[in-house]
Image (tube, rainbow, N blue to C red):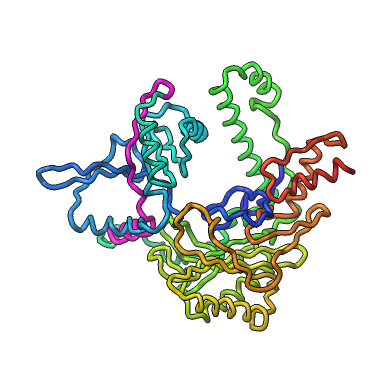
Amino acid sequence: MEDLGCQTGCSHDQAQGDATKLEEDKITDVGMLDKEETKPLEEAVEVQEDVVKTGDGPVCMEEEDNAAAPSETKAKMCDGSAEASDAGMYRYIKDDLFTSEIFKVEIQNLPKYIGFNDVKKFLAKYGLNPHKIKLMQKQTFAFVTFKSEEERDKAMKVIHGVMWKNRLLTVRLAKPKADPIMKKRKQDDDDKEQSHSKRKTLPENTQEEPLSKQIADVVTPLWQLPYEEQLKMKEQECENVLQRLTKEIGSNNKALLPWLFVQKQKYNKVCCPLEEIRPSPVQTEYRNKCEFLIGAGADNEDKTVGFRLGKYKGGTCAVVEPFDTIHIPSVTKKLVKAFQDYIRASPYVVYSPESYEGHWKQLTVRSSRKGHVMAIVYFHPQKLSKETLGALKTSLATFFTDGPGKDSGITSLYFVEEGQRKSPSLEDLPVEHVTGDHYIYEELLGLTFRISPHAFFQVNTLAAEVLYLAIADWAQLDHNSTVLDVCCGTGTIGISLAKVIYS
């Protein structure tokens, strides 16, 4: 087992939400970023109910945020002011934007003790391809979203009334999730109406932590722990996973009980041994791909490039510069500073996920040990003309080749016009080369790989080498071996193993 995350336990790119899994290798030009929807909204937990007519007017049935069972939903009066407030919380749902929230259903009366994969396989059995699945803990219902109205309606037709493990399933439409920002602001407004005496205040002489520490705690939560302690924590997490896996095998596969009994006796009550973690050779400045949001700064600075201080679903859009974080290379920070200087001097404002107005959205920086640095700028064109966009790209190119940004270290610059998406993927967005080289190159185990803007490549190159050497060791390959590198992406694993086979 290798540790590739160092300070965080895993890679962390807030521009794409909470990215907590290792990126797969992929060098093909069609490899796309893993963004999900128009906004990083929390999965739905609110149920659409029919408006019930009463003598006092319509009553809207709405589920509480703690995802109580549908039978426990509370009725709320829908007066004019409430309707206006709710309209704000659901304004992200527009006809010309894609969000699977508008194609959501609730499946009720599910069997107990099923997991995500069980639901996914069950739906696939009926030819259904869900966009998202949200299971409610210890509840017998789930929320499922689809990519189109047609797919949603098909699901309602084929699943409603089906028997699954002696449970008769029912399906109904589900209400979209409220915009987290608008919801939090409504809550804040409600709080302001309360008495000052009931509010929580900081103790006297207590100062708020500096933003540099706050953002470090968000993107690298283990940064203050010695690396050895981090590894112990991660090892304990892996042991917990093994314990849960052992329990699930015993509960769901009775045929394996004899084997499981023997394994538990051999390996201290778990199904298999846990290898020691092989540490990463580098714990700082290891990240070769970083994705930065562009937004209003937490320090009230406009046009800030960095990380969000919290998640959008937590009700914040404030961005903090990354210059004091320890996992980002200095060459990347240098480029971020130069780009931030450029956009602050430009006439274009940052894109707002609340109002859908503005332009600057995201900056992705890729670097390599060969000294190559690629920047990918994401910009919402709104209604700007092609001539205006062309002038902007020329200005960017001039800034980084002959202007103040020429010493930033950039070797490749791309520009992406990212408007409001009408599909769940970025595959239709063209990536336009602006200046410099078309690719960057990286060495891994003596091999050189060409990396394009959206190629998938391990974010910690030195740790990836440790991982691949472990794979070669465990695979016990020789010249008679055949390696199938399934879902290979760039092919780094298969190509590195080929050296062993053909040596």
Q: Residue furthest right?
A: 503
In which quarter of the view is residue 232 placed? top right
Q: Position of residue 388 (x, y in %)?
A: 50, 78
Q: Position of residue 324 (x, y in %)?
A: 61, 67
Q: Quadrant of the N terminus?
A: top right
Determine if residue 220 is in view.
yes
Q: Position of residue 55 (x, y in %)?
A: 9, 44
Left or right, 308 with reference to 158: right
In the picture, measured across the screen, residue 471 lies left or right of residue 391, that is right
Q: Is residue 21 above or below residue 406?
A: above
Residue at (45, 63) in percent of width and height: 317
In the rendered image, the vertical position of residue 135 relative to residue 306, given as above or below: above
Q: Residue 319's x, y, as percent?
A: 50, 66
> Residue, x 47% and y 64% (percent of image)?
419
Residue range in magenta is 164-191
Residue occupying image coordinates x 44% and y 37%: 135
Does the magenta run of residues contain 465? no
Position of 499 compared to 56: left or right?
right
* Quadrant of the snapshot with the C terminus: top right
Picture residue at 43% right of the left edge, 61% below the top? 316
| Observer able to see residue 211 | no
- Count the labels in the image: 0
Q: Is residue 185 magenta?
A: yes
**As drawn, 107 above or below 176:** above
